[in-house]
Image (cartoon, rainbow, N blue to C red):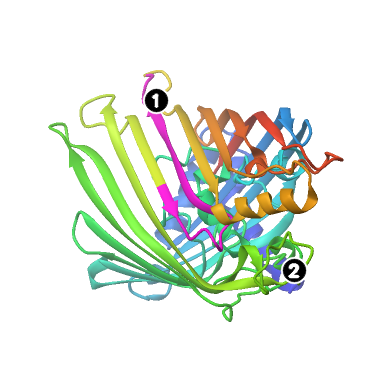
Amino acid sequence: MCSVLSRAVTLLATFACLVLAPAAYADTDPAKPKAAAKDTRELLADAGYQFSLIYIGEGLANISGGMRTGAIYTGRLDLGTTIDLEKVMGWTGATFHANMFQIHGDGLSRSYIGNLMLVSGVEALPATRLYEFWVEQKLLGGRLAVRIGQQASDIEFIDSSYDDIFVNSALGWPGHAGINLPSGGPSPPLSVMGVRLKADLSEQLSAYLALFNGDAAPPGPEDPQIRNPHGLLFRVNDPPWWIAQLKYKFDLGATKLPGTLTGGGWYHMKSFADQRYSADGLSLADPGSNGETVWRRRNPGLFIVYEQLLMRTAPGSDKGIAFFLRASASPSDRNLVSSYIDGGFLFTGFSDRLPNDRFGIAATYARISDRARALDRDTQLFTGTPYPIRDYDAILEITYQHEVRPGFLLQPVFQYVAHPGGGGVDPYDPTQSRRIKDGVMVGVRTTITY
């Protein structure tokens, strides 16, 4: 397995070096190398090969509250390729895509704050792993697309086009899904095997349906990222997870401001542990219970996404002030988070001198389920201690993304983390009676894209 991964890493790195090589000597000869770099990429694209390199590096600090104060550096290198199989081998309408992560550094949430919705979508255990590996076939003149292979769900499902600026993980793949689904669901850093169908029913209406393997990692007590360390398990035998959505595009007002409304649901066919009761009907906090969790069959969820451009900076421009809102819900008895909502504003094109700079402000709110709260009250009752009753985990994020030059972004970020761990007990409190304090995170993200 490791040798396969090493060969994949070597192959992708070789391709990346081939594409990046002209840029390495671009300053030595102002005329020829720049033209060579452009020609190399254009020639590869014309032949059907596209390569990408993205490096995200973050220096983040928890300056107040949380489990403890401190700072970390974390980074993720993403090497990818997309191949037009029609150009390469005559396979009409087919595309192949693969990418891999090299993740390094510590995580601020896991080591310092203790919140459920990680302060960074890059945070993960250090690893070199294959992420996506799929083939897509377009049919019916491109109106139907079928994708098969190892893939993620966060790019197309429960997604907004206005949330990609934000650093917090839940403002990418929503916290409701990331907290409740096995291994966090198909989202960074773990993807799963699956089949996805996308059908453009009209210019305004698109339908999505996917069947994913229900877990990225095999059963076990360790972190799922440890149980699937390199992304090479390609599991297909777990109870599946279905997800479907309808996306409707529309224009609002006389100026035709674009918006979309998306609604859908999911259905996981695995059994989920009850948040309060044991198999003998007693509370899991009751010393007299057998301690074996009762299992609830299946797990459904519903969600809705609304996004809207509110104002243009200029007639016909796609820049201006935009808004998004997402909400979702699942049964209380088998989920730690029973309801979730997030939303925010994105400001773009507000400076002629800095046309690609962006500013964003957003918030998330994950409500701890009634069944999990009841377990905390039971713990108070049976232990006789003022054990904290969890209620919610929430984030406020403010960030500004500055384009230093094309392909290089500098992004300061601030997050206020309310009730980390849902307002749970501080693991460093010897009395086990105090909540984790609200945290304050500040930091800088840099993104290099080629």
Q: Amino acid at mark 2?
A: Ser
- Foreground of the two, 286 or 171: 286
Distance from Cα at disc 1 to Cα at disc 2: 63 Å
Residue at mark 2: 289
The reply, left or right, for residue 357 in relation to residue 223 is left
Q: Quadrant of residue 396?
A: top right
Pointer 1 or 2: first along the chain: 2
Quarter of the picture holding the N terminus: bottom right
Marks counted in the figure total 2
* Mark 1 surroundings within 10 Å by alpha-carbon count, few (fewer than 14), some (14 through 19), many (20 or more): few
Q: Quadrant of residue 428?
A: top right
Residue at mark 1: 355
- Foreground of the two, 402 or 389: 389
Q: Secondary structure at mark 1?
A: loop
The reply, left or right, for residue 285 in relation to residue 324 is right
Quarter of the picture holding the C terminus: top right
**Magenta highlight range:** 327-351
Q: Position of residue 365 (x, y in %)?
A: 51, 41
Is 409 placed above or below 40 here?
A: above
Which secondary structure class fits the magenta region best? strand
Q: Position of residue 379 (x, y in %)?
A: 73, 52
